[in-house]
Amino acid sequence: MELYQLEYFIAAARERSFTRAARRLNLAQAALSEQMRNLEAELGSALFHRGRRETTLTAAGETLLSHAEGLLARAADVKRAVTDVGALRSGRLAIGAIPSVSACVLPAVIARFCKRYPTIELSVIEGTSGGVVQCLESGQVELGVVQLPTVGAQFQEILLFNEPFAVLVPRSHPFANRRQIGLAALAAEGFIFYKGRARDAALSACRSAGFEPRIACESSELETIRSLVAAGLGIALLPGLALKQPGKHCNVVRLAGSPLKRDVGLLCHRSKQLSPAATEFVALLRATRFV
């Protein structure tokens, strides 16, 4: 059963005449009659009482009419909804991001996106790089912003920016007023590590500098790390974005020679076509100056 057949059927039912219905549809009467016979054959029931002066509906025809108009209305709604998504008038976009990016990078991009497309429902899920990858794999998000590289050939990686790490120390610390410091000079310090790929990068850099860092604490929350550093429980090696707001009682000290950096990039599935909303968000993200 085709939608156009239902349109023809409704016209014939309302006009009570194939001749008048064909004229209204700008269709040859023979073509209309053939389509109604095809429809009756498919449904296995006669739909019309064909009289010389007037064509009326059978009981089966009345039943079909009661459903046909609703079916066409729903089909029109579906078409309109799909068109709206393609034209960015409706839809939903979910993005996964590591916390430093979601707090310091995405707000400006989201603001521009929402100004252009206020009817798109946008959601952001925070997590470690590994957590964001899992969300992408499960389909919970369509785009992910993570620390590169990742494991998995199914994802396309687009480098957005790279940033150096620095040291967050309490203001009472002997190093607090230094402009920069070598990583090896931190060997005797207790470290508060930021969980995720940033932790792995910091740990590897310490080992490359010749020492195994003493871990005082670990946390996945930046505010918790700032508070622990401010309380004098240790220092933290953090990427630049995470240090834009160091807190009232902490100082940021650069690492001499910038020995520790991280790449931040956008992930999306290679095998899945991006939605129109995701495509536009990617364009805005790539046009943004980050650091």
Image (spheres, grey):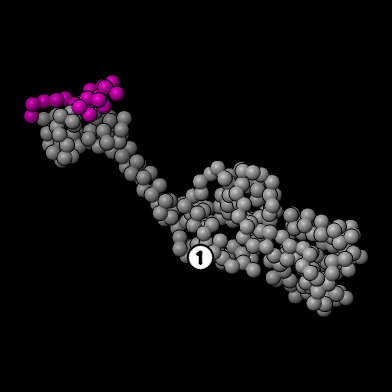
- Viewer-nearest residue: 97 or 208: 208
Residue designated by label 1: 112
Say left or right for 256 vs 271. right
Q: Say which residue appears at 47% left-offset and 65% top-offset.
A: 115
Local secondary structure at mark 1 = helix
- Viewer-nearest residue: 46 or 4: 4
Q: Position of residue 220 (x, y in %)?
A: 74, 57
- Viewer-nearest residue: 167 or 89: 167
Q: Quadrant of the C terminus?
A: bottom right
Say left or right for 40 vs 142. left
Q: Which residues are magenta?
A: 34-53
On the question of residue 21 being in view, the answer is: no
Q: Quadrant of the N terminus?
A: top left
Residue 88 position (above or below residue 38): below
Q: Amino acid at mark 1?
A: Arg
Q: Position of residue 120 (x, y in %)?
A: 47, 56
Q: Which image quadrant is residue 6 in?
A: top left
Q: Say which residue appears at 56% left-offset and 65% top-offset.
A: 288
Q: Position of residue 211 (x, y in %)?
A: 90, 59
Q: Which image quadrant is residue 167 in?
A: bottom right
Say left or right for 64 vs 171. left
Structural crowding at the residue carrying mark 1, measured as other residues with C-alpha within 10 Å and reported as few (<14), some (14–19) or many (≥20): some
